[in-house]
Image (tube, helix red, strand yellow):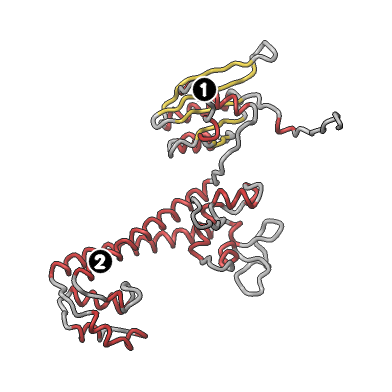
Amino acid sequence: MSQEGTLIEVADDDQPVQRVAAIDVAKASGMVCTRVPHGSIPGKRVTRVWQVSATTNDLLALADQLAAEGIERIVLESTSDYWRPFFYLLEARELQVWLVNARDVKNVPGRPKTDKLDALWLAKLNERGMLRPSFVPPVQFRQLRDYTRLRTDLTVERSRHVQRVEKLLEDALIKLSSVATDIMGVSARAMIEALINGERDPHVLAGLARGRLRVKHAALVQALTGRFDDHHADLARVLLSQIDALSGQIEHLSTRIEALIAAIPAAQGVDPDGTTGPDAGTGADAALLPAIARLDQIPGIGPGAAQTIIAEIGLDMTQFPTAGHLTSWAKLSPRANQSGARN
């Protein structure tokens, strides 16, 4: 058997970082640790650990201090949402900031658990290049993400209110959802409004049907025969008001999302030189499609989902080393579980 072994080339970026900082993040403060070369003793390093308040002024002062010390890289733990002010203000100072998963850096058996030692441990891992940064999108995509995530939350909340309306109708023995697919559609909504306004005749209510629902007149008469009373009407009005308010807010968010994406040049379809040219457009003969239109070509993805995808992962795919990294991070990769397998 050969004893020569294998020659491995070590990349330059594997070399230790000379001037590093780490912050163990908490809700109201952070424990900061810096490690820099000693000023007069070669090979020796100077370590400082101190606590800083998580207020804007104190963090701005910290950013200035770290920049003055020539810190090359700062790592933060992704603790809840408490890391955000640290990351945003240090990033704004044009410092290199890495957000790292706490699970990847603290699982060392037998290591004491204190804020100071955690900060020191993070700094040592940082200088030795033993950490990997989490994906944090640029500011414009973070703002876009805030809008798309709130839109998703409000859409879910609106669906819950629609379900409450359906349960209220069931309580009143009104089986409208058994005939009409969408109880918030034009016809069903008109019937509910008429019920709220005092109309109880099922034939009159069924006569409000429009489009394809007209052929179901007899079934509608049966479904609209119930015991809808004033207290049902009062509750239904409250729920419909909530649904209408949420719909207006969702529409506002969608308009804002479209404007934000329109302001991102890379989302509009650009030529290889990085400029929007005559080949970019939305027409069938366009060689370069805007990002929304390109994603919309994928079966199962519509414009709304395309907006959410852009908000979540951005447009710069170099952030993800491989397709596997992207699908794993964004949870886009489907998986098939065998019967009896654990999720």
Query: Can you identify the residue that label 2 sits on?
Result: 167
Residue situated in front as seen by the camera: 280 or 320: 320
Q: Residues within 10 Å of mark 1 (few under 14, many from 20)?
A: few
For label 2, the SS is helix
Label 1 secondary element: loop
Tell whether 297 sits left or right of 273: left
Neighbours of disc 2 within 10 Å: few (<14), some (14-19), many (20+): some
Whether residue 285 sits left or right of residue 169 in the image: it is right
Residue drawn where x is 60% and y is 37% of the image: 132
The circle on residue 111 is: 1
Q: Is residue 218 left or right of residue 149?
A: left
Is 48 rendered above or below residue 122? above
Residue located at (47% from left, 58% from top): 257
Looking at the image, residue 185 lies above or below residue 31? below
Identity of the residue furthest to the front in this view: 340
Q: With respect to residue 10, does 47 lie above or below? A: above
Residue 295 percent coordinates (x, y) = 58, 64
